[in-house]
């Protein structure tokens, strides 16, 4: 209960604010998302990588992210083949289980649980997941026909890509960002996490509980909330990551399905109802599973 009150409840209250305002005012989410995507989040990414001490742990994070992704894809492919599922069903399974909500949900949970040091890792993992989703998420949402050019275009259209490159540039240079300019970036960066949390609450308000294919939804939720963190735990045992990073990666891997993937499924008409159902149910159940996981890890 202590973990729930100290870590999970504050996050839920901010989600709830977004949920309530959307139910009440029916706000157009797109302009708010544009502000978060093109202004607040790039500022946060720049701030984090400008101040972070890039070391071998960040390389291990990259290895972990791809190992987790390919493990989940392989897990889904094996079960899809074993149960005689179609290629489209397999793609739906992968979309709903291989990509976690490391940004809107994972980063604030880790901030409350592990402080600024853990949060720096969480933001780095969020950027990495964004790149992965814009490559592999696009591929599986489009069932391969979009091609590498579309995935590359998606990455190049991400503002966080340029924020990351600019921050690395300043890391390599003997001079640093002027203090007054950095102060402006800090102010904008401080708005990023509460803004994306409110947006997630608004997105959840637009999802409707309906007639779900409960066996398939249950499968997706189980893989996302239980199989994924178990694989993450195994990977952190194998890889020489420090204890704090290990906790951050396991908690991130236990996050519900990413809301961004729902938009990709809608864009390419690849089982959007199923993917959104898994996202909604996994987000609701994660209130319990994340609380339990944080208790175990602590």
Image: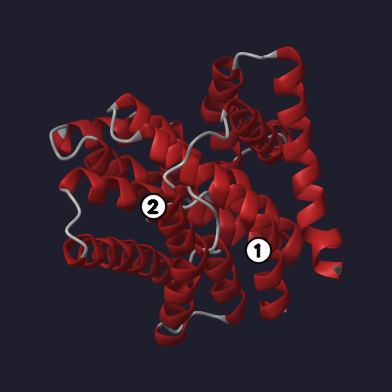
Q: Are marks 2 and 1 in contact (CB under 8 Å)?
A: no
Q: How far apart are marks 2 and 1 (CA)?
A: 22 Å
* In this picture, residue 254 sits left or right of residue 131: right
Which is more toward the observer, 137 or 192? Answer: 137
The picture places residue 20, in percent across and down from the top left corner, at 77, 27
Q: Is residue 48 left or right of residue 67?
A: right
Q: In this figure, which residue is indicated by the disc labeled 1? A: 290
Q: Residue at x 41, y 41 (%)?
A: 275
281 versus 253 height, above or below: above
Assess disc 2: are there few (<14), some (14-19) or many (≥20) residues with their C-alpha within 10 Å of its C-alpha.
some
Q: Give the camera-side residue of 46 and 152.
A: 152
The N terminus - image quarter? bottom right
Examine the image and state in which quarter residue 196 appears: top right
User: Could you tell me which residue is drawn at 68 percent across and 32 percent down?
Assistant: 195
Quarter of the image for residue 121 reads bottom right
Q: How is the image coloured?
A: secondary structure
Query: What numbered label is drawn on residue 216?
Result: 2
Please indicate whether residue 184 sits to the left or right of residue 224 in the image. Answer: right
Can residue 162 be seen in this snapshot? Answer: no
In-front residue for pair 218/143: 218
- Residue drawn 66% across the image and 78% down it: 297
Q: In which quarter of the image is the C terminus?
A: bottom right
Return the x and y of residue 153 as percentages of the image width and height.
Answer: 25, 30
Eye-nearest disc, 2 or 1: 2
Q: Is mark 1 on a helix, strand or loop?
A: helix
């Amino acid at each position: 209960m202590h973990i729930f009150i100290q870590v999970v409840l504050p996050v839920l209250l901010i989600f709830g604010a977004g949920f309530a305002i959307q139910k009440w005012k029916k706000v157009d989410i797109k302009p708010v998302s544009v502000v978060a995507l093109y202004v607040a989040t790039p500022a946060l990414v720049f701030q984090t990588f400008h101040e972070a001490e890039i070391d071998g742990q960040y390389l291990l994070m990259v290895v972990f992210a791809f190992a987790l992704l390919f493990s989940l894809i392989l897990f889904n492919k094996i079960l899809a083949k074993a149960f005689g599922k179609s290629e489209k069903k397999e793609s739906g399974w992968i979309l709903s289980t291989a990509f976690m909500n490391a940004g809107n949900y994972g980063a604030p949970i880790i901030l409350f649980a592990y402080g600024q040091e853990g949060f720096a890792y969480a933001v780095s993992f969020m950027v990495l997941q964004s790149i992965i989703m814009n490559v592999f998420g696009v591929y599986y949402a489009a069932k391969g026909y979009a091609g590498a050019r579309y995935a590359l275009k998606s990455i190049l259209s991400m503002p966080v890509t340029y924020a990351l490159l600019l921050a690395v540039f300043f890391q390599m240079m003997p001079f640093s960002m002027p203090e007054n300019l950095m102060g402006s970036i800090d102010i904008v960066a401080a708005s990023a996490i509460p803004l994306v949390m409110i947006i997630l609450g608004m997105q959840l308000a637009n999802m409707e509980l309906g007639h779900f294919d409960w066996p398939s939804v249950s499968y997706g939720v189980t893989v996302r909330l239980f199989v994924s963190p178990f694989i993450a735990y195994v990977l952190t045992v194998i890889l020489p990551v420090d204890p704090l990073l290990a906790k951050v990666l396991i908690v991130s891997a236990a996050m519900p399905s990413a809301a961004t993937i729902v938009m990709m499924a809608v864009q390419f008409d690849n089982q959007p109802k199923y993917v959104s159902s898994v996202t909604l149910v996994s987000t609701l159940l994660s209130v319990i599973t994340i609380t339990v996981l944080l208790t175990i890890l602590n």
